[in-house]
Amino acid sequence: MSIKVKFWGVRGSIATPSVDHMKYGGNTSCVELLINDRIIILDAGTGVRMLGNCLLSRNMKDYLFLQSHTHWDHINGFPFFAPIYRDDVNIQIYAGHLAHTCGIQHVLSSQMCQPTFPVPFSELAANLSFEDFQSGESFSLGDGINVKTAPLNHPDGGTGYRIEHDGVSVCYVTDTEHVIGETDENVLGLIEGADLVIYDSTYTEAEYPQFVGWGHSTWQEGVRLCQMAGVRNLAIFHHDPSHDDDFMDQVAKDAADAWHGAFVAREGMVVDVTRTETRALETVGC
């Protein structure tokens, strides 16, 4: 049994559609998990537009979102996600940071209010359901898929996820800020023994002191946490918009030298995570 992971958007903060960001990709956060015939979507950044078109071409009708948080770079692809305009599609949307405030439905609908978007949320045809939970809770998605969560250190709150199925575990930990010299016990507990951790690596260790308080971390901290937690592989994720392909090539080299389990996530990359290995797959189309 395996969990297939496809990266549809790996950039943080803002999309970077430029020639020097082509190798690693310019779309913002969106990751697809395929577990048997179940689709789980991690965040709705600009990468979700292409994923939506792909899902319709695959004739997929049922899937759900797990939202890390609702800053623009993680939700601004949602109005362009083609399945929300189809009445034969069922979509569940989960979020863990809004249970005591406005709720995930309000946030997604408010970004589609005129005059900022021409199609109102009320016109969406899909069968949408919304689940606001409290970060730190665990729940089942059925079909043997279990989810554990943890609160993250990020402005306005955020949620880290651990998705488990048949002994295979994938963790999604973005946007989160560490404190130099301390260990984030919430993250450490969530990722313990995981097969793959997708981690907020917006900055390098050298850059980080300039951005304390901005809510992000480094690939070096990701390596440290994964090694402490006995994780098998780390996907370096949420690349800063100023980090072009040459910069990311150097990050990939430095990370591989630091730890054999680390690699840089690229838009379009697919990895197959099993009980024994995490391996890249060749893909054709979507």
Image (cartoon, rainbow, N blue to C red):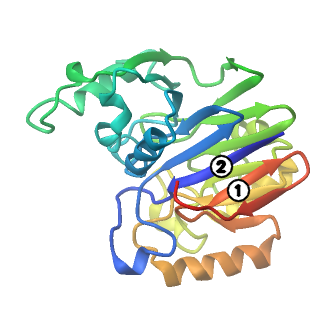
- Estimate the x, y position of residue 121 in percent, counting from the top left: 23, 24
Q: Quadrant of residue 233?
A: bottom right
**Is residue 174 shown to the viewer in this render?**
yes
Horizontal side, residue 61 vs residue 262: left or right: left
The local secondary structure at tag 1 comes to strand
- Residue holding disc 1: 271
- Estimate the x, y position of residue 133 in percent, counting from the top left: 54, 17
User: Residue at left 24%, top 33%?
Assistant: 111
**Is residue 188 shown to the viewer in this render?**
no
Instruction: Please state which amino acid type lies under the numbered disc 1.
Output: Val
Q: Quadrant of residue 172?
A: top right
Observer-nearest residue: 261 or 85?
Answer: 85
Observer-nearest residue: 58 or 186?
Answer: 58
Is label 2 in contact with label 1 (beta carbons under 8 Å)? yes
- Estimate the x, y position of residue 59 in percent, counting from the top left: 49, 35
- Estimate the x, y position of residue 252 in percent, counting from the top left: 65, 76
Which of the numbered marks, if any, corresponds to residue 5?
2
What is the crowding at mark 1: few (fewer than 14 residues within 10 Å), some, or many (at least 20)? many
The N terminus sits in image quarter: top right
